[in-house]
Image (cartoon, helix red, strand yellow):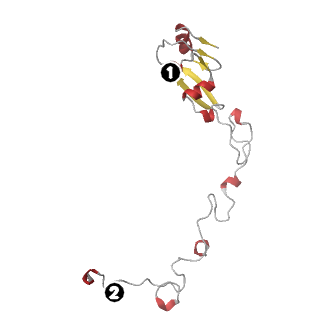
Amino acid sequence: MIDTLPSPKTKQKAKKIGRGLGTGTGGHTSGRGGKGQTARGGHKSPRPGFEGGQNPINRRLPLMRGTPSKGHGFTGRGSFMAIQRNAPVQLSELEEAVKESKNADVDISKLAEYGLISPKFHKELVVKVLFDKEIKTTMNLKGIAVSKTAKEAIEKAGGKVE
C-alpha cells in the first residue's frame, strides 16, 4: 500500500508569481504580457464592436432611411425591418392534413393548426399553395394564395378557392 503512494519529491510545488524580479517568475509583468488594457485587473474581452476607443463602424456609417416595405433596409439604428417570410405549402401535404381533420374549410389559422406553417409567424407569412400532384379530397380555401395549376386541381376535385 505504501509503495503505491507517489513520492513527495516527484510533486512540484506551483510557482508563486509576482513576488519580485529575483524569483524568476514574473517580477515585472507577472505573466500578463506587456502593458495596456489586457494587463489590467478584472480584464475580460471588450464588448462586441469595440475598436479600442476609435469610433466603431456601426457609429461611423449613416443611418439607413426609407421604409422596410419598399426594401430600403432599416428605419433606424437598432430597429429591424418587418421581414416577410414566404411559406410554400404543397397541395399533397394540405390534402393529407384535411383528410386527417375531416374539415374541408381551410384558412391561415387552420394551416397553423395542421402544422404546415409556423404558428409563431403566421401573421407575417405569405402563404401560397403550390401544385405537386392531383388530389381527390374536396377542400375550400379562404384567404390563401393558390397557384394556377393548384386552383385547377382543387376545383377538379370539387372544392372552391375564395
Q: How many marks?
A: 2
Q: Which residue sits at x=57%, y=30%?
A: 117
| Amino acid carrying mark 1 in the image | Glu
Quarter of the rendering containing residue 14: bottom left
Locate residue 143, reporting x and y percent: 65, 20
| Amino acid carrying mark 2 in the image | Pro
Quarter of the rendering containing residue 128: top right
Of 141 and 151, which appears nearest the observer?
A: 141
Helix, strand or loop for disc 2: loop
Examine the rendered structure and indicate whether residue 52 appears above or below residue 12.
Answer: above
| Quadrant location, the N terminus | bottom left
Locate residue 76, reporting x and y percent: 74, 45
Of 51 and 146, which appears nearest the observer?
A: 146
Of 100 and 131, which appears nearest the observer?
A: 100
Quarter of the rendering containing residue 3: bottom left
Q: Which residue sits at x=33%, y=86%?
A: 8
Q: Which residue sits at x=51%, y=90%?
A: 21
Other residues around mark 1 within 10 Å, as few (<14) / some (14–19) / many (≥20) = few
Other residues around mark 2 within 10 Å, as few (<14) / some (14–19) / many (≥20) = few
Helix, strand or loop for disc 1: helix
Residue 8: mark in rendering:
2
